[in-house]
Image (spheres, rainbow, N blue to C red):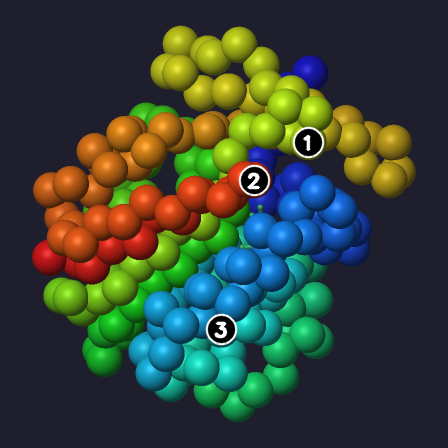
């Protein structure tokens, strides 16, 4: 089975994507994160990377000064646009590896469930590009899954670069082989150590978040 691009897979999955937020065992964690995350970004000019269907955007939009959300998939963006209709929020097609540059740089950035789709060999490049689009002192939160036996889709043996993969099935019966990495706290801290201060690692049962300030 060939490896799907992350964008093509999520375009195909767009209409059924939000069901992932209905998994019963994840509800407590989700309510906790939905409560915590907006408090980090109150009053900020926020760049949201790989916003998908706008699940997290809906909680962030009411507290930020302005928000630009990018995603590579027109299909997920169409759902996000329907879901969040607030004048200071803009959704645009964009590439996470080449985030938009704004004259008035972003004071914060958020990426939900994106980092796990970044190949290990591109992690440094992704972070470098993200940080280049932010103001000094910007607040950053990267949120993603922890691997939980019996809840997470099983992962493959690592490839030569250490990347792991999942085989996922969509409603139409199609199967997709997707890159999905589960970085450790140590790896995440190491990846930002040269460019960040006030690094905090938050762990819930099913999720983690790395929160830091761009030095
Ligand atoms: C796991 S979903 C996360 C969506 C959303 N952030 C959330 O937490 O619900 C990953 C998203 O990455 C998007 N994506 C894939 N490749 C991308 C790229 N190169 N640049 C920006 N977005 C990309 C997909 O279209 C998909 O919406």
Residue bearing the label numbered 3: 60
Q: Label 3 to label 2, Cα distance in Å?
A: 21 Å
Contact between marks 1 and 2 (CB within 8 A): the answer is: yes
| Left or right of 23, for residue 165 | left
* Label 2 secondary element: loop
Q: Label 1 to label 3, Cα distance in Å?
A: 27 Å
Residue at image coords 22%, 66% = 138
Q: Which mark is residue 206?
A: 2
Mark 1 / mark 2, whichever is N-terminal: 1
Residue bearing the label numbered 1: 151
Question: Residue 165 in the image: x percent, y percent?
Answer: 57, 22
Residue at image coords 60%, 65% = 54
| Left or right of 71, for residue 31 | right
Contact between marks 1 and 3 (CB within 8 A): the answer is: no
Q: Is residue 170 above or below residue 195?
A: above
Mark 3 / mark 2, whichever is N-terminal: 3
* Label 1 secondary element: loop
Q: Is residue 3 visible?
A: no
Question: Residue 207 in the image: x percent, y percent?
Answer: 51, 43
């Amino acid at each position: 089975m060939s490896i799907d691009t992350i964008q093509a897979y999520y375009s195909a999955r767009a209409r059924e994507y939000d069901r992932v937020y209905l998994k019963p065992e994840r509800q407590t964690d989700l309510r906790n994160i939905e409560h915590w995350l907006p408090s980090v970004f109150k009053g900020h000019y926020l760049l949201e990377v790989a916003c998908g269907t706008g699940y997290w955007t809906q909680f962030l939009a009411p507290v930020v000064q302005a928000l630009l959300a990018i995603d590579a998939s027109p299909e997920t963006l169409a759902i996000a646009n329907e879901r969040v209709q607030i004048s200071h929020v803009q959704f645009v097609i964009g590439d996470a590896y080449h985030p938009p540059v704004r004259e008035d740089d972003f004071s914060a950035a958020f990426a939900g469930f994106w980092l796990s789709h970044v190949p290990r060999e591109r992690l440094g490049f992704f972070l470098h590009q993200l940080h280049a689009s932010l103001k000094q002192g910007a607040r950053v939160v990267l949120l993603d899954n922890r691997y939980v036996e019996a809840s997470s889709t099983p992962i493959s043996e690592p490839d030569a670069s250490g990347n792991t993969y999942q085989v996922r099935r969509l409603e139409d019966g199609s199967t997709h082989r997707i890159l999905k990495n589960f970085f450790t706290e140590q790896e995440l801290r190491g990846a930002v150590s040269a460019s960040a201060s006030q690094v905090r690692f938050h762990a819930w049962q099913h999720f983690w978040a790395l929160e830091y300030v761009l030095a």
